[in-house]
Image: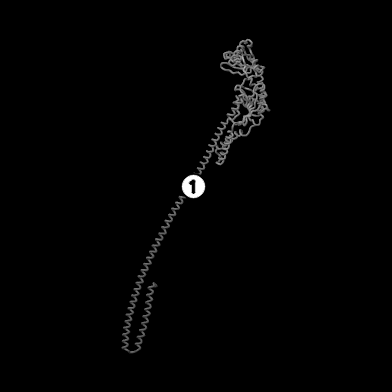
Amino acid sequence: MGTDESGDIGERLARLEEIAETLEEGEVGLERAQTLREEADEQLTTLRETLNVGDGEIIEVSSDNTDDS
Amino acid sequence: MADADQSRAGTRAPPDGNVWSVHRLNTQIGSVLNAAGDQFPSFVVGEVSDIHPYEYGTFFDLRDLNEDTTISCILWAYQRDTIDHELEAGTETIIQASVDFYEDNGQTQLAVKQFWPVGDSDRSEGLEELRAQLDAEGLLDATAKQSLPTYPSHVGVVTSLSGSAREDVREAVRSRHPGLPLTICDATVQGEAAVPSLVNGIQRLDQSPDVDVLVVTRGGGADADLWCFNEEPVVRAIAACTTPTVVAVGHEDDDTLAEAVADRRAMTPTDAGVAVTPDLSVVRRDAAQLEHRIDRAHDTLVADRIDRLRQRLDAGYQQIERRVQRQQAAYQRAGDLEHRIHAAYASVVRNRVDTLEQRIAAAHRDVVHTTEREAVTAHATQRRLYNLETRIDRAYQTHVDRELDQLETRIKTGYRNRVADARVTKTETRTRRLWAAVAILGVLLLLTLFAVVTGLV
């Protein structure tokens, strides 16, 4: 099954949602807020790098297991 | 015509002589068919499929019950409106029709005048039996469907590399997520070879460790072309996939068992590509919205904290200001008190000094007065003493003179009388005694005067 960066998109969005909700609740101190903000910036940067990749590979194979093209 | 093809095959030179145009050919075919009209039956039996009704008429295919052959049919609206029953796909039907040839496109079809359904075909009955069996096994149960991954990392596609479905899926995926890798497994999607080809392709991609969502698809076609997606091996291969599977066969109105057992049915190959691919523009929009929310929440939180700190600072400042004001008031009061104390002290000292000066002055005056008075007194005393001395001296002198006169007189008398020396001697003795008394009296007088002058008296 697939893994890595595409899976990370959902995880990063979920983490960003969590950070947004935590900050919106306003129950954290300034230091924690700064830490969360920096983490959000890193998550957003990595997420955008993931989203801005070029065209993905297209692999064409034959239904005959021994005859990939 | 066939002979000419064989004689010229393999040569680059065009054929000579009898070369027909398409129009001439179609016209000739039409003429032949019209001439042979009595050679065709008026009634034909087959399985109805691919029904497409329009206002002007209904198109459908009539499929041979035993062979994989079909012929197109048209039931014009004016004929359709006179018939009180409906065409049903999958139904074995007897139709009354004539053979029409259309010279414009060279197609032949049956112009239907009447039809009579005679029951489901064997193929349709087999399809429904398999559907019922799959249903009994729970393979059609919606709760048994797997969820598609929201953000797949690799999409597998089983379709024909030469079909339009491949491009439709690829375009749909690329338009939404250009970076998403695709593995496209070429498969035969119609005809006798389709079933093993589709099964192999499905199983191969299902076993691929990279693929986390699978699309099985083909474009539209006649029911006969799509029938392989109702074949049990294909249907069961899809149902057995551990990878979430989307099946899109033909168009919206095409319904196959492969789609029924899939985790998700898509209407078209494009819809299948859309179904398995996250729209990155939406992801970017969501990310931007999250960034905006985080920015706003962070700024609000920081502003709130700063506001609270500012309020505390203001309160502290005001408290300090009040304290300073109290201290300044205390300093002012202390200054006032100090000033008052200094003033009072200076006043007291000045008064005391003035008093002392007055007392000193008074004392000085008293002393001066006393001294002056004493001086006057001393002067008066001295004068008095002087007067007394003078009086004493005068009295003494007077007395002495008197005594002397007396003594002289007596001496003279005694002398003259010189009666006896003893009398004269006695007078002299008395004179000496008197002189001693005068001396003593003078000393006493001096002592008295001294005592008066020195204040002893």
Residue B135 lies left or right of residue A37; in this view the side is right
The kind of residue tagged 1 is Ile
The quadrant in which the C terminus of chain B is found is bottom left
**Residue nearest the viewer, comparing B324 with B303:** B303
Residue density around tag 1, few if under 14, some if 14–19, many if 20 or more, within 10 Å? few
**Residue nearest the viewer, comparing A5 with B19:** B19
User: Which x, y percent locates residue B387?
Assistant: 33, 75
Q: Is residue B191 above or below residue B397?
A: above
Q: Exactly how many numbered labels are in the figure?
A: 1
User: Which residue is rendered at x = 36% and y = 82% of the image?
Assistant: B435
The quadrant in which the N terminus of chain B is found is top right
Q: Quadrant of residue B181?
A: top right
Dot 1 falls on a residue whose secondary structure is: helix
Q: Which chain is indicated by disc 1?
A: B
User: Which residue is rendered at x = 57% and y = 17% of the image?
Assistant: B54
Residue on which the image places disc 1: B320
User: Which residue is rendered at x = 44% and y = 53% of the image?
Assistant: B335
Residue B365 lies left or right of residue B51; in this view the side is left
**Residue B244 in view, yes or no:** no
Q: Quadrant of residue A42?
A: top right
**Residue B415 in view, yes or no:** yes
Q: Is residue A27 above or below residue B161?
A: below
User: Which x, y percent locates residue B225?
Assistant: 64, 21
